[in-house]
Amino acid sequence: MAEMDEPSYIDYEAFLDPDFSPPAFANSLVLATNNPSDTPLDLSTPLSRVLFDVQEIDTHIDALITKSALPLLEYTQDNASSSARLLEETESQVASLTESYKRLEREVIERHKAAEEVRITAERLCETVKLGRAVSRCFSLGRQLEAQVSETTGAGSNDSRKGDHKAMIRAAHTLILLRQLLAATGKGEEGEGLNRVHVIQTLQDEIVANAERTILSRAQQIVREFSMSSLLASSQTSTISSTNQPSNSSTTYAQTEDTKSRTISALTTLYLLSPLKPKATTISSSFEPTLLLTALQSYLQTALTSSLAALARALATLPTLDRTLLEIAARCQNIVALESLLASTPAPPHPLLQPPSRPTQSSSSSIKPTSSTIAVSATTAPPKLLAPLLAHLDTAALPSYFWRSLAGALSARVQDILARGGVSARTLRSNRERVREALRECVGRGSQVPEGVGGVGMNVAAGTGKKGGAGAGAGAGWEREAAVMVGAVVGVLGR
């Protein structure tokens, strides 16, 4: 304010000072116009001073406004005209931009919306077609499964020997395909969305489940009824011959082959329909056919239970011992035949399992086969159905498992007979040698391969690895089993 044209007595610097204090300024005015000792203070003089200063400042403001009004108006007019020109240019640019956006919306956005609707429609149509194909395939497999089950059951016949037993294998493959299709319901998989189709759920509940139960029941029935021993038939033939009556009870070759083929079909069906463990490896060498193992173990357990009960009764009533031992030998021969059949039947290729990797052979075809290459080729052969059963039972041979399990449960029954005493116990003790020879003969006869059973023809002694012919007795590799059976009865009698 010191640079103004007209001088002024007002101290503008004091008023513009950031530390200016109105109370301090008023106090200084009062002290300047009054004595400190005056009792009545004269406030009119400082008040007049303040009013005069205010009037002076107001006059100065009016002078400044009057002097600078024209430049301010010109400056405001210039700014207003510049703003008007800028607004005109901006409005033209905004109009052009709006028109471009509308054209872009017509040519791109609207077309993109239409294209997006077409894309969504096409995707949904593709999903519908894919789902329709999956449903159609499910129904086709369902009709195929119904026809195969009808072939298996022989058009409603209750006789398990009627019908095409090979249709069980075809039905098992169809069931596996249905399982695979119905399980592939993930994103992008073949059966995506099938779990939301009600008719597919009906197909599973009414067709697939019933067909699977029927096929499994028929296969398990064939395994339960497996019998290839001709001991009982030969005994009946000899009895009838002694009375000069005609006999037709001998088993023909065609019947034997039919029994073998039906049993192989049943075993293959049970192997294929055995469930895969969730999150398990897909290598076939680690696959455990639980349905097959359960059916075979049930067959062995039934033979053991029947033999144990019959032998316990026969030891209490010795006149029936020969007939009972003949029946037990026939059961063991069936087990030997079953073992031979399992050992000669390779595990079928499972559609959901990968075959085990085979070692690479030398690219040179001129190398002659040696013992090592023959061993490698033998180890890479398809596994047989017998291997998982032997591993599950922890045994080397099924006849050995039968005789040792029977002997293990028989000792307690003999002890019960002796504990009861009476005629049965005395007769059993007095005929100890006869029982010994009968048991040895039973083991030897039961460990023979039945006539007409081809394939491996095993008669392996437990722990020795020897092979016996079809007419070999207990002395041809089954001495241990015979000794175990004799010890379970005669050994208890000697105590």
Image (cartoon, rainbow, N blue to C red):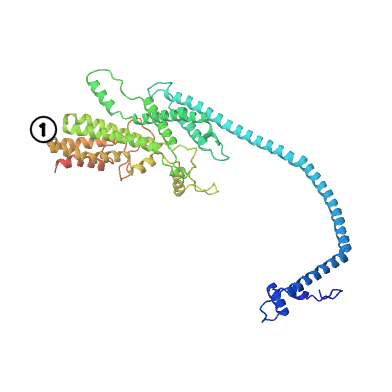
Residue at screen point 79% across, 75% down: 10
User: Horizontal placement of 343 versus 203: left or right?
Assistant: left
Count of numbered badges drawn on the protein: 1
Percent across and percent down for residue 98 are: 79, 45
Residue bearing the label numbered 1: 423
User: Horizontal placement of 190 versus 171: left or right?
Assistant: right
Figure quadrant of the C terminus: top left
User: Horizontal placement of 329 versus 375: left or right?
Assistant: left
Figure quadrant of residue 66: bottom right
Q: Is residue 44 visible?
A: yes
Q: Amino acid at mark 1?
A: Val
Q: Nearer the viewer, residue 471 or 18?
A: 18
Crowd rating for badge 1 (residues with CA inside 10 Å; few <14, some 14–19, many 20+): few
247 vs 489: above or below: above
493 vs 143: above or below: below
Residue at screen point 30% across, 22% down: 249
Figure quadrant of the N terminus: bottom right
Percent across and percent down for residue 239 are: 23, 23
Q: Nearer the viewer, residue 47 or 104?
A: 47
Q: Is residue 332 visible?
A: no
Figure quadrant of residue 491: top left
Q: Nearer the viewer, residue 26 or 88?
A: 26
